[in-house]
Image (cartoon, coloured by chain):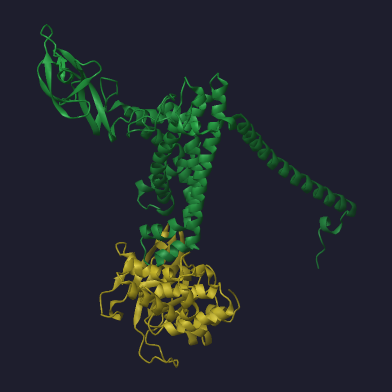
Chain colours: A green, B yellow
Amino acid sequence: MSTLPKALSEQDADFQQSNASRRQRMSVWFYGLCVAIALISVVVLVVLLVSIWVQGQSRLTADLLMNSHSELDIERSGMWPAIIGSLFVCGVCALVALPLGVGTAVFLEEFKPKAKPLRWLHGFVQLNIANLAGVPSIVYGLLGLTVFVYMFNIFGQIKVNESSGWELMGANHKYQVLSLETGNVVFVPQTDPDQRQITIDQPVQGMDAAGDPIEIEVWQPGTPKPTDPAVRRRTVRSGAIGATVTEKSWYYFRLPLDKSFLAGGLTLALVILPIIIIASQESLRGVSPSLREASMGLGATTWQTVRDVSLPAALPGIMTGSILAMGRAIGEAAPILVVLGAAVAKNAGPQNLMDNAVTMPVLIYNWAGRQQDEFKELAAAAIIVLLVILLLLNSAAIIIRHKVQQSQS
Amino acid sequence: MVTVSTANTDNGEQNAQPDRTLIQIDDFNAWYGDFQALHGLSLQIPRYKVTAFIGPSGCGKSTLLKWINRMNDIIPGAHAKGELKICGEAETPPGRDTNILDPALDVVRLRRKIGIVFQKPNPFPKSIYDNVAFGPRLHMKTTKAELDELVEWSLRKAAVWEEVKDRLHGPALGLSGGQQQRLCIARAIAVGPEVLLMDEPCSALDPASTLAIEDLIFELRSQYTIVIVTHNMQQASRCSDKTAFFFEGRLIESGDTERIFTKPEQKQTDDYVRGKFG
């Protein structure tokens, strides 16, 4: 029969007692510490919300929601174009980032490539995702500027009155010429896109401001001017110069994207892509391998398994990650400032695909930096609106996620 | 090692006709990366019989089972050499032998022919109906009525219809463990396999559910060739016709279940079936 080791056989009862109570005390202390730390973050949040509310609540008016930014009438400045602009930019961002992110996650988690180059790609992508998630968003802004706004100047530079890049659709070019009637213009259709202006010295077919075809006549200086206003309206001085104007349909599209909301949305998509990929990967990894085995065992292909088993089971987690990512995207100011610029003077949302946009964070950044107290209050009020919109979008997504979860179990 | 003689059915078995080999395994070796899990084993699995694989943990019986329908494909680094084929003459109508290890083989069709039931019941988080209809929807073009009929037939075959017929569109995860496992069997037979592989199908179940599954296995062998991996010696002796004993990646002995359990030829088999180790 073996004797107990010394440490077990000779026990110091006093020490045991004091040690036990000391450890108990430590545990209580630690518990208190954790509660205190948790409280600090809550207190900070409450202070933030209260101070913003106090500052901004007087400006929470219909004007704020429905008007646009105004330098002259600060009292009635609003953020309507910024709300619409943010929704457009984030819409593009979601449409691009969600399929790309979930697709990448599926490739990384569900497909274990056997071929060597694909295996290499697999490892390379995996290695890069984690690093990309830590890159500051302003760096993505610079990337977006090069890749989306300028497109490496492959398609030429966009310059006012000189070049519009490669216009692919939705653009209708015409020359605008002053007629003899003051304040009235006529238009001549443009045939050669490279010719930015024309000189009119003989009668041509054209259009009036409403787009109806008219015969444009030419008045030679030195001869009597027509007096009938209707004739004066379609007559131009000989040698009058017409400059190009472009009528843009909503689907106007050109390369490079220039400072358009599309470029802004694409840049934001880059910012949140790693977040979505990592969240989706975690979520797919959480799907029980036995479900995949069951599906494969029934003769499902990898694609069928992903579509019918893995993705549905991972969807709630993927949606949670996406909600967080979209929250980040809607509040992101730095990359938008780089890509779209800091201008806030815009009185409507984007009118076509290539239109610029103001977003809420940029407007808040602009207002908060102003000297006037009115703008500071407006900034606080705009923050409240931003938070409310964020909350609304998140609750909508959470409700959808809940529905998805219920339909599965 | 020792291979079963295919004509050896003299131990009072009810089916008098000689065994027809369905799956032929010869000099089969399998690896996980560099680790060799199976060493040159040879075995015939007869048609319309229940063949049990027994042996201690890590002896390679599950590995062999999962090679039969190439489930090991999804494990990185798993590879095998040797002969593993489905015999053509055992099929109706007679066809050519199918080499299971052929890299060009369509595993989707192979797995439809050779279904598998896993250790832990793993119904999809969908309704009972959708679970059973999952396989048919992958492989077949059916009308709603045909699918309804197929689902009912499968659930009846798996002896779980009576318990679930009133809640076909309720969640499968709401069933008990034993019901879930029978649902998984129904799901497997709904695609019309010839072979059912069962990887310790009862090890996660209580005794009553185990008994229900064993009865079911006995029932099913008139139409399916069943291969069952089990740790439970009584289970092997209760519900199998043939038994193969594995030890450390080798096939030690195989033959009629009754003989293996009463008059084993090898000492290791004797020790194992008497419960001396394992």
Where on the picture, by quarter, is residue A349? top left
Q: How many marks?
A: 0
Nearer to the camera, A13 or A388: A388
- x and y, in percent, of residue A208 in the image: 19, 25
| Vertical placement of residue A96 versus A155, above or below | below
- Residue furthest right as drawn: A14
| Vertical placement of residue B186 versus A354, above or below | below
- Residue furthest front as drawn: A228
Where on the picture, by quarter, is residue B220? bottom left
Q: Give the position of the N terminus of chain A as an image quadrant.
A: bottom right
Nearer to the camera, A390 or B219: A390
- x and y, in percent, of residue A121 in the image: 38, 44
Nearer to the camera, A379 or B62: A379
| Vertical placement of residue A54 versus A3, above or below | above
Q: Can residue A136 be seen here?
A: no
- x and y, in percent, of residue A141 in the image: 43, 30
Residue at the location (49% across, 48% down)?
Answer: A396
Q: Is residue A39 left or right of residue A88?
A: right
- x and y, in percent, of residue B221 in the image: 41, 83
Residue at the location (55% across, 18% down)?
Answer: A371
Q: Is residue B24 left or right of residue A329?
A: left
Nearer to the camera, A241 or A257: A241
Where on the picture, by quarter, is residue B44? bottom left
